[in-house]
Amino acid sequence: MDRRDFLRNASAALAALGLPAFDALAQAPRQLGLRRLGQPQPFDYAWLKGHARALSQQPYQSHRRTLPAAVEALDWDQYQSIRYRQDHALWGDGEGKFQARFFHLGLYFHSPVRMYDVVDGKAQELAYDPAAFDYGRSGLKGQKLPADLGFAGFRLNTRKDTERDFAAFLGASYFRAVGKEGQYGQSARGLAIDTGMGRPEEFPDFIAYWLERPAPESDTIVVHALLDSPSVAGAYRFAITNGDVLLMDIDSALYPRQQIERLGIAPCTSMYQVGENDRRMGWDWRPEIHDTDGLSMWTGSGEWIWRPLCNPPRLRFNMFVDNNPRGFGLLQRDRNFDHYQDDGVFYEKRPCLWVEPKSDWGEGSVQLVEIPTVDETFDNIVAFWNPREKPQPGQELLIGYRLYWGAQPPARPPLAHCVDSRTGLGGVIGKKREYFSWRFAVDFQGGELASLIDRAEVEAVVSASRGRVEIVSARPLREINGYRAMFDIVPPDDGTEQIDIRLFLRSGGRTLTETWLYQYTPPPASERTLY
């Protein structure tokens, strides 16, 4: 399966995780639980790291298996009708605040994932049980399925709300979470390998999970995961704290089997089809369609950078070199329903995802991959940290970071930030256009801007890697208590070579805004209509 098919399938399946409806049978109050296998065994993160190291020293073996024919044949609607029964929820008979339920194999999910319950430092494997599932309209007969079929992943709920999950792990090393808005959107992965290169991407798998039973009053669930792929094995520890902004505190230990050309740490995966700055695929009745609208970066030097996302005509790869980054993430800054008009999937409620390193990450780069798409079910945006030094076999890489899921990231620029980026044909209104140019209108809000309206001269500082910048202005935008910068870019020739643009506002030599970066691809000469 290539990246496009894999991401389309994983994205569509994960998008359906939110707000599932359960029937009366699934809400039965009697707690049946799952059968345990074998005897409880001592378990902690140190043991898991040793296990991952040992696994990396063995030849890789695929974890994908051929499922029973009836399971292999499930279509989308049939698979979605399968529900895990509430009366079999893990920790459903306890006093804690949380419960866990499991996903069935089928559709795009062919790799069984082993599940363990950890109580008082001892782990015991959970047995697959067809009686734990309501097979709905799937046509499956539980009694005819293998007793060792296994699970595909799991979801987490609060005891107060057993219908809506706040986090889910399903497919390869993918996982998602929500803030108080309760709306799934972009996803994260344990690891990305060779993303955006001229060869097939490698998708590592979480092949086993250990779920620690939370103390009755705890607001945090601890989940451990074992990662495996042809290039690397690894151990992960997630401390998940549910709240208005959901926090995942993550420690990971990676053990490469071979040199990895492009290692992606803390990968964020999102979708961008059309927006106010890029209407290339804008044939839909909805004005905007995206999970996130920009990449935000807080560099090691303290600079804040905002890079609006695009749906490019061909694959784009950007590398933002840094040393010890303070954070980065894919954000959905535009939270106005009127800009999307989608009352089904509510793009304005999609969570931002912010990555915060827990220690110095050294030299490397935040890398952004944008892939063309004509379909909103395809996750075409990936951002991750890539260390400068390529991982080598036999190494141990210890990497810790925090993920924040919610409407607003915990770290925000003290300067004014970009709230809108619009583009269109350039030129002067009322005058005949003699040549092609492209207009950019960028709105900034916050910081000192509101206090500077009519009191100070504010200028837009614009630079471009190619072509000519003209008609530059910065003027108050009272509707947002901010400023709008406008300028045109005139391509230097008829080619389609990209133009990198940099913009910020200043007054009296003082920087007022974060740095706005953009990558503009001029259209071919045949499409440069002057109207």
Image (cartoon, grey):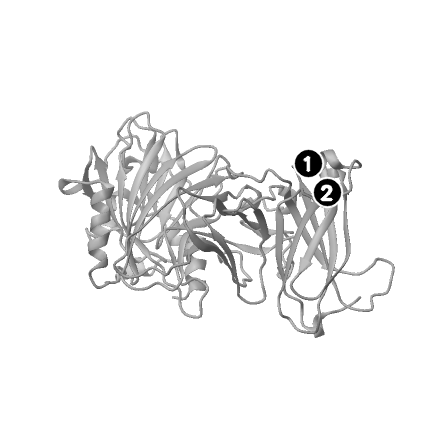
Distance from Cα at disc 1 to Cα at disc 2: 10 Å
Indicate whether 36 appears above or below 198.
above
Residue at point 69%, 53% (across, down): 422
Q: Residue 29 appears at what percent x and percent y?
A: 30, 30
Q: Find residue 497 and report its image quarter.
A: bottom right
Residue 228 in view (yes/no) = no
Nearest the eye: 299 or 125: 299
Q: Residues within 10 Å of mark 1 (few under 14, many from 20)?
A: some
Q: Quadrant of the C terminus?
A: bottom right
Number of callouts in the render? Answer: 2
Q: Secondary structure at mark 2?
A: strand
Q: Amino acid at mark 2?
A: Ser
Residue 248 as seen in the image, left or right of residue 227:
right
Q: Secondary structure at mark 1?
A: loop
Nearest the eye: 300 or 350: 300
> Is label 1 in contact with label 2 (beta carbons under 8 Å)?
yes
Residue at point 39%, 50% (across, down): 80
Residue 383 in view (yes/no) = yes
Q: Residue 419 appears at what percent x and percent y?
A: 64, 44
Q: Residue 302 appears at what percent x and percent y?
A: 54, 44
Residue carrying label 1:
448
Residue carrying label 2:
507
Q: Amino acid at mark 1?
A: Glu
* Nearer to us: label 1 or label 2: 2
